[in-house]
Structures are given as structure tokens and as C-alpha cells.
Amino acid sequence: MEAQRQRAKAAAVSIDLTLQGAIDQITAAAAATAFKGYEALEHPSCVLALVVNGEPAERAGAGDAVQLVLDSTPFYGEGGGQVGDRGVLSGDGVIVAIEGVSRNRSVFVHSGRIERGSLAIGELVKAQVDRACRRRAQANHTATHLLQAALKQVVDPGIGQAGSLVTFDRLRFDFHCPRAVAPAELEQIEALINGWIADAHTLEVQEMAIEQAKAAGAVAMFGEKYADVVRVVDVPGVSMELCGGTHVANTAEIGLFKIVSEGGVAAGIRRIEAVAGPAVLAYLNEREAVVKQLGERFKAQPGEIVERVVALADELKATQKALAAARGELALAK
């Protein structure tokens, strides 16, 4: 531990952080951050660099907004469409709430606020990832892989990913397709994905040479640059992709998948937004609250709301037609 402190202090001397371009400077001067988040959600780490309220500093106190670099971290840094982890750093009398983690090349920058105590360069802390947030992100990320596989199977085998976003609450998947996905196809995609979830496929994750991965059939994102050795996430019999993100160990952990919307975002590019895992419950509760309000407003049961709204629309249309006729007669009378 003492040797680690000395290495951290020596490394910190060469890191000059400023508000403008701080991340670029960190990337240029700091050694790569060792990511431990695949194996554990807690890990001892040492503070290498510190920015306090936008200015480089040796120490930060309670209430300070900070950006810091650790020698190693279990926090996933935003990348590959997946948002960075949230969590807490704790040490000798200090607690730092981490609100997000960004990544520039191989350096992870943790952003947050010191809630208690003080923190200095060279000190050791215990980095703890918010488990609930990580579970949500993992469920949504694995669901994007299943979504791409379902699109290829239902819509077109030639469909390719054009971008994605994986957050704690929902997922967004952009793909190349010249036409809209029909409602019946969306229902089929949804059923297919939920079937794979219920089948409880155990994911297989391994690192291999890029050429070996491509030969095995792993899907790579067009235009993305990959190292010679890549991480392959395989849902046996369903999906195999090159991916550095975090995923569930078994598809059953996702629980449920629900498509929220489908639409065009650019020429030849469609977008599907969906929710998976615990986020599905929040989505359904929100929709149920709307249905209850409509039921109370129209004095109808949930199954009668559509019929009631259609009847009111027809009644309004007839009333507007009668009103227009009355106004015409009044004008003639005048």
C-alpha cells in the first residue's frame, strides 16, 4: 500500500489539470486506468489526480464539486453507448458521491461531490458502484443485443446498428432500414425477445483476436475501431457481438422487455426506444396511472375508454357541424 501511495504521488506530479481541456490533459499525462468492474463492484483505489470546483488542487473538502482519477476502478466509464456508473467513494472519514464517470481513451474521470470529510491526492479509498443502477444498465445493454438479433430475424438479416444509448431507465437503438417497422413486426420482435429472456440463456464472455472473433460470426459496429484483442459477448444461439459494456450473466435477469416507440431519425435510419428489467415496472405504472385518470374522467372502465373517447369525438363532430349550420342561418337572418 505504501509503494502504491508513492507511485500515485509520483504520477500526480506529472498531471496538470485545468478546467479547460482537463480530460485531454489527463489522457496525455496519466497511465491507463485499470478497470475492475467486470469482476467486482467494490475495489480499493488510489487517487492520482484531483480537480476541485474546476481548478487543480491537492485536497478537496466537504461540499466541493470534484473530478478525480483513480489508479483502478470498478466504475464503468461512459462508452459504447452505455452511460457511466454511479456510486460512492469512501475512506478515512470521507464520502464522495460519484454522479458519473467519463472516459477519454484509457483514462476514467470520476465526477461527483464530497459529502463528508476531505480527500487528497495519494489517499486510498474504497470505490463502490451503485448496484441497482448497474443492474438496470446491464439489463438494458443486453436487451440491445437481443433487439438487434430480433430485428435481423424479423425485419431484414442485413440490418446494421447505426448507434445506441443505454441508460439506467431505458435503451435506444438506431439501425439502418429503408422503411418503417410494421406494428405486427414490433409485436413479433417483442415476443421473440421476451422468449429469449424466459429461456434463461447464460451469456458467454471471452477475449479473443479480432480476426478470430469475426470468423466466429461476432457482429461488429460499422465504422468502429477495435483493438487486436476484443471482448466478445455471446448469447448462445441468439447473438454474438463485440462489446466492452457490462451485461447480465443470464438473460433471465432482464425480466421483461417492452418497446416504447419506433420512428425515423434520418434518411434510411430508424430508431427503437424500449425499456427492460426494473425500468419496465416504472413504465407500466406510469401508463396505468394515465389509464386510471382517463377512466375517472370519462366514467368508464379501462376496456371501455377507447369506445367512450370515440363516441365523444363523434358527438363533438356532430355538435360542431350543427353549430356551423346555426351560425350560417343566423348570418342569413341578420
Image (spheres, rainbow, N blue to C red):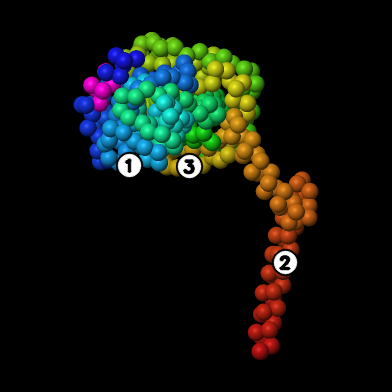
x 60%, y 22%: residue: 253
Q: Residue furthest left?
A: 14
Q: What range of the chain is rendered magenta?
A: 7-12
Disc 2 crowd, CA 10 A, few/some/many (<14, 14-19, 20+): few
Residue indicated by mark 2? 318
Across and down, in percent, residue 17 comes to 25, 34
Q: Nearer the viewer, residue 193 or 168?
A: 168
Across and down, in percent, residue 59 comes to 31, 33
Q: Earlier in the sequence, mark 1 or mark 3?
A: 1
The kind of residue on which mark 3 rests is Gly
x 68%, y 84%: residue: 330
Query: How far apart are the two marked residues, 2 and 3, measured between alpha carbons?
Result: 36 Å
Residue indicated by mark 3? 264
Query: How far apart are the two marked residues, 1 and 2, measured between alpha carbons?
Result: 63 Å
Magenta-span inclusion, residue 11: yes
Tell me: 261 left or right of 103: right
Tell me: 220 left or right of 57: right
x 22%, y 32%: residue: 16
Q: Is residue 200 above or below residue 118?
A: above
Disc 1 crowd, CA 10 A, few/some/many (<14, 14-19, 20+): some
- The disc placed on residue 53 is 1
